[in-house]
Image (cartoon, grey):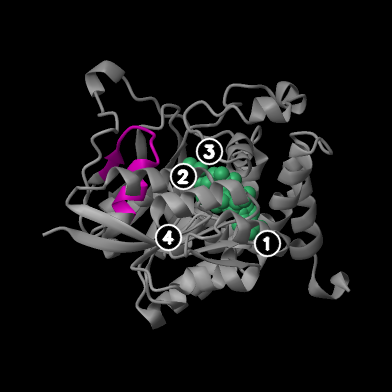
Amino acid sequence: MSACRKISILGATGSVGRAAIDVIAGARGSETEFSVVSVTANANVELLASQAKQLGAQFAAVADEQLYEDLKTALGGTGIAVGAGATALVEAASANADCVVSAIVGVAGLESTLAAVQSGANVALANKESMVCAGPLLKEAARRSGATILPIDSEHNAIFQVLDRPERVEKVTLTASGGPFRTRTLEQMKAATPEEALRHPNWSMGSKITIDSATMMNKGLELIEAAYLFDLNADQLEVVIHPSSIVHSLVSYDDGSVLAQLGQPDMRIPISYALAWPSRMRLPDVQRLDLAAIGSLEFFPPDTKRFPALALAQQCLELGGASPVVLNASNEVAVDAFLQGRIGFLEIADCVEEALETLIARPATERQ
Ligand code: NDP
């Protein structure tokens, strides 16, 4: 008998949201079928309306309140309920779904992610910034509601898949592609344009995470995300550069065994894992791994001199407290400024460092 799971997608119009819709659409007629409860976007009314119609969603919400009438018009006559603003996003997150895909970019996704966790649904978490800024809050909310947080960040999904004995874990290794500037000098990176930084070698993603990959802040945020998700200390976490993004992360146990999850860099794999959990679903369109054709897998240590954002995140991981919030907030502002051409590429990490020095490193008395 086929199971039908009810899914909501926060950030449906983004890169992860669209990949989730691909998985859902591809599952029609298979052993795991899905129905869609709600979909959300920030401002892309046209795409959101067409997704809501295609999926037969019950509710569509747009974060920008001014776009309420546009969305209402676009969905007129369909019977799909419409909402706008922060409350509507929370409503979409708390609707009666079995699984909520949390794929809004940035800390803007925190309120709706928290609402999804509080609803007790499974939460397929892509929105790493909410875990970085409020990991303990989300974990406690999940404990109270019975929600399971299923990471769909490929590295964390890999860890989730191979973490069967948490009490025996010695170390968790996050792999990093190194991004588009892996082999660039500091001088070359200084002159990097947004267009160059947006050209990721392996993954096709939204602009914010692509810039984070170029600075390696993405890996830093992922370290903090992993620490909260899997209750790990800073000294249990490390990063290794693995340019081809085939090994998605590794867990080392205290008997010397190392378990890893491998696969093509295709977000449909971790997304489907989270949607179907604790089962798995068949993805006939995903390219299979051919190790003989790949030949070799390379690994290198990260270079925190050229990628200081990673070192800053590692410091915040050790420091804890409010430092991950400051790290994330200043990074969001700096990435936006870089994309708008207001600051240079290397200044992203400079801005974050300055914010941390101003707000975290100085004693409280000096801060007034
Ligand atoms: P995109 O930029 O492609 O999409 C972002 C989504 O969030 C869009 O639906 C967008 O709506 C919506 N959104 C943007 N701002 C707001 C806001 N203020 N309020 C409500 N909704 C908003 O991002 P990605 O899909 O690349 O990334 C989403 C999250 O997933 C990020 O946290 C990222 O780090 C994480 N992630 C992404 C991966 C990837 O492969 N892309 C891999 C692993 C993690 P609109 O279209 O209307 O602007």
Q: Secondary structure at mark 4?
A: loop
Which residue corresponds to mark 4?
Answer: 57
Q: From mark 1 to mark 4, how far is it between C-alphas? A: 18 Å
Residue 187 horizontal/vertical position (percent): 75, 22
Please indicate, yes or no, whether residue 105 appears anywhere in the rendered image: no
Please indicate, yes or no, whether residue 131 appears anywhere in the rendered image: yes
Q: Secondary structure at mark 3?
A: loop
The dot on residue 69 is 1
Mark before the other along the chain sequence, 1 or 4: 4
**Foreground disc of the pair 1, 4:** 1
Residue at the spot 41% in from the left edge and 27% down from the top edge: 244
Mark before the other along the chain sequence, 1 or 3: 1
Mark before the other along the chain sequence, 1 or 2: 2
Q: From mark 4 to mark 3, how far is it between C-alphas? A: 24 Å
Residue count near mark 4 (Cα–Cα under 10 Å), binned few <14, some 14–19, many ≥20: many
Q: From mark 1 to mark 3, how far is it between C-alphas? A: 30 Å
Mark before the other along the chain sequence, 4 or 2: 2
Residue 361 appears in which quarter of the rendering? bottom right
Residue type highlighted by circle 1: Glu
Which residue corresponds to mark 2?
Answer: 18
Residue type highlighted by circle 3: Met
Quadrant where the C terminus sits is bottom right
Mark before the other along the chain sequence, 4 or 3: 4
Magenta-drawn segment = 259-274
Which residue corresponds to mark 3?
Answer: 205
Label 3 CB sits under 8 Å from any ligand 1 atom: yes
